[in-house]
Image (tube, rainbow, N blue to C red):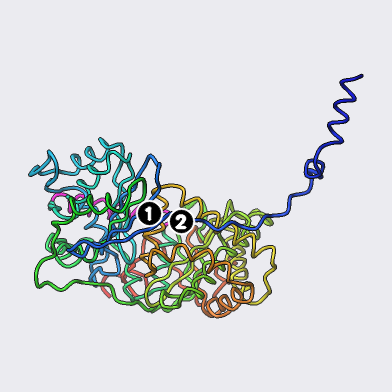
Amino acid sequence: MRRRQLLWGAALAWPAWAQQRFDQAPAPSRPRAPRPPPLSELRLDNGLRVLLAERRGWPLVTAQLQLNLGSLLDPAGKAGLAQLFLDVMTRGAQRGGGGNKGLAADGGDIAFAAESLGASLESQTLAQAATLGLTLATPSLDEGLALLADLARRPTLPASELERSRAQAIDGYRQTLADPAALAQLLGRRLFWGDSAAGQQPTPASLARIRRDDLLNVLRLQLRPELSTLILGGDLDAAQARALAERHFGGWRAPPRVPALLPAPVRARPLAARTLLVDVPGAGQSAVLVLGPHAGLEAGARELGAGLLANAVLGQGYSARLGREVRIKRGLSYGAASQVESLAGGGWMAAYTQTKHDSASEVAKLIAAEIQRLGVEPLGAAELEARRASWLGEQGRRLETSAGLAGLLSEQLLQSREPAALTRLPQELQAVDAAALRAFAARYWRADALRTVVVGDLGAAGPGLRALDPGAWVIRAAELDLASPTLQRRARGR
């Protein structure tokens, strides 16, 4: 009896928060802005920019080179050159550091060197630049930088590896033709950007035109220290960063009296179709993509912030509007999302999902309606704060890994923002209110500015899909030609 009285007394003494109903969700707290680490910047005498994000006590460090190897610089008719160069670059180098001095290393040797450090080479080609990096234990950083420096300064660009990379790229293209999701993304970029540099897409024909001399021109005109940035994130200070950068990259020199090649601003020159339907007989699902314009880098921080938040409301997260309407309410897909990209001169937005063939028409209409609704109807305060908190939370999580931190700094550079602006981004997003978001969507995402791509088994989709747009281009995947302004191969004899 004594024990029961004690327990009853303890229950009465519980604080108020412990006695609240468990079937009521707690009120959301105000989102906490991510706190970037101390940032420092320096330049070597050869022009190489070095950015350091200092995280004392972290066991891992990321070293990433951002290189002037974006696809926007691919020559006309040779789309895919930047990607091929990056692939071949990592498959042969003259080792110049440490005990490897003078050793010619092939792709297997380079992979072995990275794996011996407990790491793997991570590379990516984007529109404006390419990245090459390693994440490894801090004591191995010196050797890791020696490897990155050899790849950047002394690539051998073997002709045999060019042929191997070309064959792999062509195989990848053919696989894409059978993958509705990947093909829709490829066609969406081509449809929206058209014949601009951002609309060029690698094809077997463009890849076949690339010669080793093209790689050597890229090496001479684009792979230069004054056009490159070394990003370091982890447990080291500015003095250590400078010493390491000088040791491994200080001797890197650009060719004398050779002008550098830099990307120019791009303007979308969309293809004539507003709707593109591509038939992949036997495909398991249809991919649906709805495209619209977005702010370019010249728009400024306030406009770009409104665009980021509008995209977060539209399609960033399970409970964002696309996920709510397409998946949660109607069960038409396992998920729907959106993404944006800003370039110098312009930008674009892509909202996408996969669904059953016979619901592709309904899903395309739903996505377009949700995009336009952002520019018409007022946005509730609770929804705005939830999406803002979600976006800030994602950035905060990225700041807690060395690779995520390096990636954020790389994105700042691609957006032509100073690294220190990373600390202002949360405040810029907090300043975006519902009216600014609605104005952004009304300006960029009008009905007449949207384009639609559906890739799937058109026979299984039924007549409703073609009723979306009587003027739609309808093309079989086997007849696609991404270099053509009509996206369709010419019939023989024509």
The magenta region covers 160-182
Q: Where is residue 324 in the image (x, y as percent from the top left)?
A: 65, 58
Q: Mark 2 points at which residue?
A: 36
The outermost residue toward the left is 102
**Placement of the C terminus among the 4 image quadrants:** bottom left
Q: Which secondary structure, mark 1? A: strand
Near mark 2 (Cα within 10 A), the count class, few <14, some 14-19 or many ≥20, is many
Q: Nearer the viewer, residue 404 or 463?
A: 404
Is residue 437 located in the magenta-colored stretch of the structure?
no
Residue contact between numbered discs 1 and 2, judged by CB atoms under 8 Å: yes
Q: Earlier in the sequence, mark 1 or mark 2?
A: 2
In the drawing, does residue 249 fall left or right of residue 265? left
Q: Residue at (27%, 37%) from the top-left corner?
A: 117
**Placement of the N terminus among the 4 image quadrants:** top right
Dot label at residue 285: none
Near mark 1 (Cα within 10 A), the count class, few <14, some 14-19 or many ≥20, is many
What predominant SS class does the magenta segment belong to?
helix
Mark 1: which amino acid? Ala
Q: Name the residue under label 1.
A: 53
Q: Residue at (29%, 76%) from the top-left corner?
A: 264
Q: Residue at (41%, 56%) from the top-left corner?
A: 38
Q: Nearer the viewer, residue 319 or 299?
A: 299
Is residue 161 located in the magenta-colored stretch of the structure?
yes
Instruction: In the rendered view, tell whether residue 205 sits above or below residue 53.
Output: below
Numbered marks: total? 2
Q: Where is residue 198 in the image (x, y as percent from the top left)?
A: 35, 71
Mark 2: which amino acid? Pro
Q: Which secondary structure, mark 2? A: loop
